């Protein structure tokens, strides 16, 4: 990543040392003594202020202003006064979409899609206030982002689903359950189908289409969605998936950390065991509940995978082990842009002081 991101830090420390050295060499003892006293006082006052203001988020009680330059996909939401605190318990975080607040914005957020379609433009003619960060935001996989060479040397931070983004906004997250013990829900076992898949955007060149064809040659796969003209209404989606032992959570592109609502919502909330195709096993293990999914790459062949699914469906005990994670974990979905944006404030202090994505295209495709 070092080759992609140019990080310039202000040489504050060096400057301070040089000043101290100069002072030391030029003043008499008395002056030196008073200087040291003053320094100690400064440090003490600074520490006290730091303590007084320390919150889990940022160390100044100043409100951060996050300016959303336009709403993703043109769908806006109300931004009432202290939304981040009221809805998400994130203090000192002002989320705004009023462009006149540009001069006071700490972060200005640009959603990628509208830049590509030309619906929106970057305000490159505006003078950026000192310290303001411009953020690039996208939830799409790299193949859908297009060429990004014209976005070199513009953005200071990335907001996306990747774990190595400055602000990570996953589609979902595992969280430890506070109350231990019993399964909140019974293991769903009223099943009519072995394997189900919901697909609207079918492309034979997608890796997932080849895997589907091979799997369907071994075991029956029930297919829903636009492709097979068996569309599901959004209210029918989860009840339909719950009728299946396994759900194919196949991503449309295979990219680092790209794990979408197909896993987090469709499979986990539908109560089917997800069979995943997407990034490597390690990426799933890092974020998904333990023993909650079956990874396609774990099998020598798709026939082996099909046989495994068949056997598992006939072994209720073994099958229900794929739901044991629910004793200790729950799954949280992220669907609201406002929540994602408020999260900038909770991570603001760990952002690098100065940072420019000199080659965003390379970073996105990494
Ligand atoms: C921060 O914002 C809140 C809510 O809008 C407001 O009540 C508070 O006075 C602001 N604090 C500062 C230091 O501006
Ligand atoms: C199982 O699913 C069927 C629908 O196919 C439904 O009629 C039946 O009530 C369900 N049984 C249980 C125990 O939930
Ligand atoms: C899956 O396989 C079955 C049985 O061979 C076949 O009838 C069906 O058309 C296949 N489904 C798709 C969507 O190709
Ligand atoms: C943000 O990026 C701009 C443009 O490359 C740069 O001039 C500015 O110093 C950066 N600001 C921060 C806070 O990193």
Image: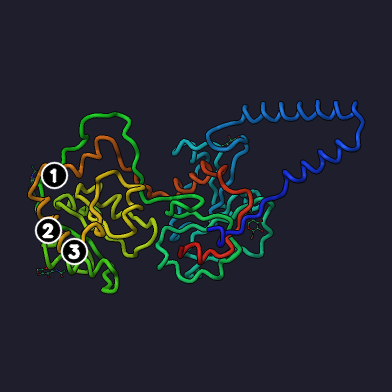
Mark 2 residue CB less than 8 A from any atom of ligand 3: no
Compared with 52, 13 (above or below) is: below
The foreground one among 188 and 224 is 188
Q: Residue 70: horizontal and vertical position, in percent?
A: 51, 58
The secondary element bearing badge 2 is classed as helix
In the image, taking residue 252 as reference, residue 361 lies left or right, namely right
Q: Which mark is residue 352?
A: none
Q: CA distance from mark 3 to mark 2?
A: 9 Å
| Residue 7 placement: quadrant | bottom right
Q: Residue at x 24, y 59 (%)?
A: 296
| Residue 256 placement: quadrant | bottom left
The foreground one among 37 and 137 is 37
Q: Residues within 10 Å of mark 3 (few under 14, many from 20)?
A: many
Q: Which residue occupies the extreme bottom position in the image?
A: 205
In the image, taking residue 196 as reference, residue 172 lies left or right, namely right
Label 3 sits on residue: 302
Q: Residue at x 19, y 64 (%)?
A: 301
In the image, taking residue 176 as reference, residue 20 lies left or right, namely right
Q: Earlier in the sequence, mark 3 or mark 2?
A: 3
Q: Earlier in the sequence, mark 3 or mark 1?
A: 3
Q: CA distance from mark 3 to mark 1?
A: 20 Å
Q: Residue 287: horizontal and vertical position, in percent?
A: 35, 47
Q: Residues within 10 Å of mark 1 (few under 14, many from 20)?
A: few
Label 2 sits on residue: 307
Where in the image, quadrant-wise, is ligand 4 located?
bottom right
Q: Residue 59: horizontal and vertical position, in percent?
A: 60, 35
Asked if labels 1 and 3 touch by Cβ distance under 8 angstroms, the answer is no
Q: Residue at x 11, y 62 (%)?
A: 219
The secondary element bearing badge 1 is classed as helix
Label 1 sits on residue: 318
């Amino acid at each position: 990543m070092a080759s992609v991101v140019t990080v310039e830090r202000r040489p504050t420390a060096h400057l301070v040392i040089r000043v101290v050295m100069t002072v030391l060499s030029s003043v008499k003892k008395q002056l030196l003594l008073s200087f040291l006293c003053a320094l100690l006082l400064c440090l003490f006052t600074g520490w006290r202020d730091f303590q007084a203001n320390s919150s889990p988020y940022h160390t100044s009680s100043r409100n951060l202003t996050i300016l959303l330059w336009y709403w993703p996909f043109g769908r806006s939401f109300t931004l009432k006064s202290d939304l981040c605190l009221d809805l998400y318990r994130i203090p000192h975080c002002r989320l705004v979409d009023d462009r006149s607040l540009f001069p006071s914005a700490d972060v200005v957020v640009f959603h990628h899609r509208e830049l590509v379609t030309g619906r929106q433009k970057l305000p490159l003619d505006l003078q950026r206030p000192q310290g303001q960060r411009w953020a690039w935001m996208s939830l799409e996989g790299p193949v859908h982002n297009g060429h990004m060479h014209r976005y070199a040397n513009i953005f200071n931070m990335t907001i996306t689903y990747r774990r190595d983004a400055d602000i990570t906004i996953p589609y979902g997250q595992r969280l430890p359950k506070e109350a231990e013990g019993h399964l909140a829900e019974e293991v769903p076992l009223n099943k009519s189908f072995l394997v189900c898949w919901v697909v609207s955007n079918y492309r034979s060149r997608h890796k997932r289409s080849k895997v589907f064809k091979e799997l369907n040659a071994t075991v029956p796969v029930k297919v829903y969605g636009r492709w097979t003209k068996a569309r599901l209404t959004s209210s029918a989606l989860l009840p339909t998936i719950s009728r299946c032992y396994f759900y194919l959570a196949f991503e449309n592109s295979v990219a680092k950390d790209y794990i979408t609502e197909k896993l987090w919502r469709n499979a986990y909330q539908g109560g089917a065991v997800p069979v995943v195709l997407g990034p490597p096993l390690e990426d799933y293990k890092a974020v998904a509940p333990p023993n909650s999914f079956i990874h396609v790459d774990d099998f020598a062949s798709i026939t082996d995978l099909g046989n495994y699914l068949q056997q598992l469906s006939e072994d209720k005990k073994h099958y229900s082990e794929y739901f044991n994670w629910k004793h200790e974990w729950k799954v949280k979905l992220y669907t609201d842009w406002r929540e994602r944006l408020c999260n900038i404030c909770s991570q603001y202090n760990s952002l690098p002081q100065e940072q420019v994505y000199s080659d965003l295209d390379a970073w996105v495709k990494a």
